[in-house]
């Protein structure tokens, strides 16, 4: 079976899975709504562009002013669904579910790239300090009550990207960025930023609860604005990564080999690092630090589809979306809301340990 | 293939005598003169496959390669030899464009490799790395297919030409049999072939191999080099860094001996692998001879035998009777001398192999006065003299005569003397004197007997040295 066929098959299959997970998830909550009804509401809402009002607009970082769809939909099919059910699904649950899907998509993509980039199956998206950077920006904004142009998300995004760039600069010498140096620089900078965050926490006073909630990773209070923001930021870097899938495969053989096979190693590394960092930064900026998605999902998918990034990247991204929607559903469906980061970590850490043990056993 | 390496034009005007030295190199006068090693016949092809012109490369601020000038013709198998740290890998990485030279130019089929994009460069040069740790378990076929990377645009599909190149490469290297297994699950020898297949799929005129035999067993070493030889016969130009000098000598058309970042010698294996060159490059004593089976130049490295701390043994043999003794004693670490032997005698060849101090006389000539004197001095210097189960005639009777003055004497007897005496009464008389003084043993007792005697003698010498007594004291006096 050709790579293209396999990539298509996995993508279609996982897209269907994602759709199912979304439908089921939208039915779960304080008010239970049947999947059939949810599906009806969604079908009703999605394919009707005439119903989308472009009256409101949102200012987004990097893209400027963009129209935002409002929630007034025309229902040509007029499936039998109560008005409250519609409101619950479309304005309460759907933004959160879609945000979870996009964040999961982003983190799994970035994780896949970083694992390939570092030739280490244990790497994760924030290995170059992106998450810590975002956390510093967000925590500082909350604790110091800063007023920044694009709000909390803007501050987190900027500090995340700046951190990744600083780590890259520290690790680069004579135009070369050895991966091992990058890894160590990332660890050192993360430790430093950890100290900064701890210090800020001490100063936080009243806002401590808010800060801790952000740090744990959260999707509650998701808005269509955030969904739109991510939906606009993600496609370009994702496509860039996707067209470099073959280069990423060759990079797995080692940089010397990659060069001998005609890859411009340093340029490709720079591009992959930048795109993966931007993808991670965008996700972390809206959702806080949600751990383990970017580590565990690429891993599971590599076991299923193999190491070829032309298949692995889309499969991993889509599976990441499903995974986070599912875990966030667990997070919000209990008696009290738990930050989703707690759930992913609780699911992810044991799985990570399982992988660690089995790898040890199977390594020659 | 002797015509495939030559001096670059810049060095020609100095008489073409030395390939290694670049004209502007300040240290060139310090290098020993090696007039014979690098004189190569002028190379007729106007477009050599590889041309290095006064190339200097530095890594982390220190100069690794300096003044490298060489031309390599199409369809040549070049062996890059030299001690660890001589710059072999650096030279390969410069040839494939991974490292840029500080000075000089590298041209591959008339194109400056460092002016090309990485992609264009890897359509000219393919590299087989020394080791590849593939952390992810790609199937073998996928790894080979990656060899097509330089030929494919970012959005190009997989073409028929790509498929053909991959099939041919896998066929050639016989990896097709395990094409679907993960590359992490194949053996070292198989992985080596996969990497060669990947390089072949690149379809380049030049193939570089970094220690292609380093981690392989002897069967796979030979198979790998046979494969490269076949490729070279089909017109590929191959440059391989090879540690094993004998494999290099056997398979390569041309050797380049690197030492301290410079070319010490280049040319035919016969001209490069000389004892003087090996001493200069490796700081190792080695004996260069012909391999009895393959006829290739054959290098045997010797243990550092200059010091005779274990003791010095003189062996009297001939006609093959002394060879085993020489090998055994050499392996046990004794400094050896032997003679006099006719040039071409089996034992003379053995003596060269183990680096023994050898006294020879021309073929079929008897031992003359000069040779006798030479043997006398060696017997005197020796702690132990061993007389092998040798056949005695008029010609070599002086050898036995010399042994009568030995400090410690060991006679190996496997046949009765009468069965190997062709020197009549004179022979019997000399041998009787030897038997009176010496220890008569069979060959199994050789090491233990020599060991005891040498130990005693060396110990006595050390005592004398300590007490500051006369060094010339005949230590038989101690008895």
Image (spheres, helix red, strand yellow):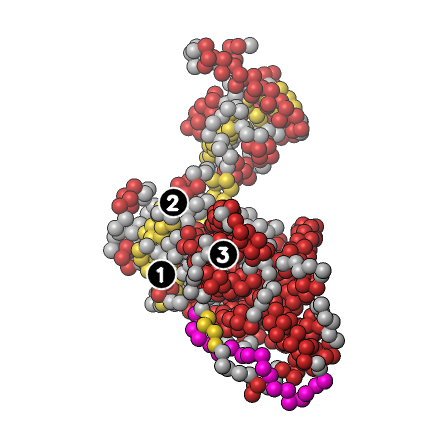
Q: Which residue is mark 3?
A: A142
Residue B309 image offset from top left, x and y in percent: 50, 24
Q: Is residue A201 magenta?
A: no
Indicate which disc residue A363 carries.
Answer: none
**Dot 1: chain letter:** B
Q: Determine if marks 1 and 2 fall on one subunit.
A: yes
SS for dot 2:
loop
SS for dot 1:
strand
Q: Residue at x 74, y 79 (%)?
A: A36
Nearest to the observer: residue B422 or residue B431: B431
**Residue B103 visible within the image:** yes
Residue B276 image offset from top left, x and y in percent: 40, 41
The answer to whether the residue labelled 1 contacts the one labelled 2, judged by CB atoms less than 8 Å apart, is no
Q: Which residue is mark 1?
A: B106
What range is drawn magenta here? A62-80
Magenta segment main secondary structure: loop
SS for dot 3:
helix
Nearest to the observer: residue B350 or residue B52: B52
């Amino acid at each position: 079976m050709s790579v293209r066929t396999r990539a298509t098959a996995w993508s279609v299959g996982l897209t269907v899975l994602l759709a199912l997970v979304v439908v089921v998830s939208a039915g779960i909550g304080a008010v239970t709504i049947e999947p059939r009804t949810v599906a009806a509401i969604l079908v009703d809402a999605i394919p009707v562009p005439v119903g989308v009002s472009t009256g409101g607009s949102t200012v987004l970082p990097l893209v400027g002013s963009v129209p935002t769809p409002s929630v007034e939909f025309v229902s040509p099919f007029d499936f039998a669904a109560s008005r409250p059910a519609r409101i619950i699904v479309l304005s309460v649950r759907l933004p959160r579910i879609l945000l979870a899907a996009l964040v999961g998509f982003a983190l799994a993509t970035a994780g896949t790239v970083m694992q390939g980039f570092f030739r280490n199956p244990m790497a994760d998206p924030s290995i170059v300090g992106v998450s810590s950077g975002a956390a510093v920006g967000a925590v500082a904004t909350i604790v110091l009550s800063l007023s920044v142009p694009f709000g909390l998300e803007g501050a987190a995004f900027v500090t995340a990207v700046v951190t990744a760039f600083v780590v890259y600069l520290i690790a680069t010498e004579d135009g070369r960025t050895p991966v091992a140096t990058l890894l160590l620089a990332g660890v050192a900078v993360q430790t430093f930023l950890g100290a900064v965050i701890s210090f800020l926490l001490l100063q936080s006073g009243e806002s401590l609860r808010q800060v801790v909630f952000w740090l744990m990773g959260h999707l509650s209070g998701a808005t269509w604005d955030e969904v739109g923001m991510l939906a606009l930021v993600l496609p370009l870097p994702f496509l860039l990564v996707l067209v470099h899938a073959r280069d990423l495969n060759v990079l797995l053989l080692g940089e010397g080999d990659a060069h001998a096979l005609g890859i411009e190693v340093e340029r490709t590394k720079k591009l992959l690092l930048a795109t993966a960092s931007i993808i991670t930064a965008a996700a972390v900026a809206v959702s806080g630090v949600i751990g383990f998605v970017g580590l565990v999902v690429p891993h599971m998918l590599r076991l299923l589809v193999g190491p070829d990034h032309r298949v692995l990247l889309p499969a991993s991204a889509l599976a990441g979306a499903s995974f986070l929607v599912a875990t966030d559903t667990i997070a919000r469906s209990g008696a009290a809301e738990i930050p989703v980061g707690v759930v992913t970590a609780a699911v992810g850490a044991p799985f990570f340990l399982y992988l660690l043990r089995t790898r040890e056993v199977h390594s020659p | 293939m002797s015509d495939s390496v030559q001096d670059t034009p810049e060095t020609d005007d100095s008489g073409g005598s030395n390939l290694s030295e670049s004209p502007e190199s300040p240290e060139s006068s310090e290098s020993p003169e090696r007039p014979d090693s690098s004189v190569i016949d002028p190379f007729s092809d106007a477009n050599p496959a590889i041309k290095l012109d006064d190339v200097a490369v530095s890594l982390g601020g220190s100069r690794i390669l300096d003044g490298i000038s060489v031309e390599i013709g199409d369809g040549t198998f070049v062996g890059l030899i030299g001690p660890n740290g001589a710059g072999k890998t650096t030279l390969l990485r410069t040839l494939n464009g991974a490292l840029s030279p500080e000075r000089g130019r590298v041209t591959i089929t008339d194109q400056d490799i460092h002016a090309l994009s990485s992609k264009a460069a890897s359509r000219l040069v393919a590299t087989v790395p020394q080791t590849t740790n593939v952390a992810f378990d790609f199937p073998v076929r996928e790894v080979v297919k990656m060899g097509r990377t330089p030929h494919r645009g970012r959005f190009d599909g997989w073409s028929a030409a790509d498929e053909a190149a991959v099939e041919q490469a896998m066929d050639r290297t016989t990896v097709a049999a395990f094409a679907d297994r993960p590359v992490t699950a194949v053996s070292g020898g198989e992985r080596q072939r996969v990497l060669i297949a990947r390089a072949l799929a690149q379809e380049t005129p030049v193939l570089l191999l970094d220690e292609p035999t380093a981690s392989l067993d002897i069967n796979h070493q030979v198979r790998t080099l046979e494969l490269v030889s076949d490729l070279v016969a089909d017109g590929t130009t191959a440059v391989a860094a090879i540690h094993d000098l004998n494999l290099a000598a056997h398979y390569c058309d041309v050797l380049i001996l690197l030492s301290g970042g410079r070319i010490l010698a280049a040319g035919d294996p016969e001209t490069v692998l000389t004892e003087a060159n090996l001493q200069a490059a490796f700081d190792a004593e080695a004996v260069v001879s012909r391999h009895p089976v393959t006829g290739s130049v054959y290098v045997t490295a010797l243990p550092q035998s200059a010091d005779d701390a274990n003791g010095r043994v003189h062996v009297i043999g001939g006609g093959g009777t002394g060879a085993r003794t020489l090998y055994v004693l050499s392996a046990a670490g004794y400094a050896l001398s032997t003679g006099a032997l006719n040039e071409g005698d089996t034992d003379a060849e053995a003596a060269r192999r183990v680096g023994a101090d050898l006294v020879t006389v021309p073929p079929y000539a008897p031992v003359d006065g000069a040779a006798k004197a030479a043997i006398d001095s060696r017997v005197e210097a020796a702690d132990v003299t061993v007389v092998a189960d040798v056949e005695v005639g008029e010609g070599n009777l002086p050898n036995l005569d010399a042994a009568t003055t030995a400090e410690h004497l060991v006679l190996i007897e496997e046949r009765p003397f009468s069965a190997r005496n062709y020197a009549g009464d004179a022979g019997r008389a000399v041998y009787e004197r030897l038997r009176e003084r010496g220890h008569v043993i069979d060959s199994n007792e050789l090491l233990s007997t020599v060991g005891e005697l040498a130990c005693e003698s060396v110990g006595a010498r050390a005592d004398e040295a300590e007490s500051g007594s006369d060094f010339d004291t005949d230590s038989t006096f101690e008895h």
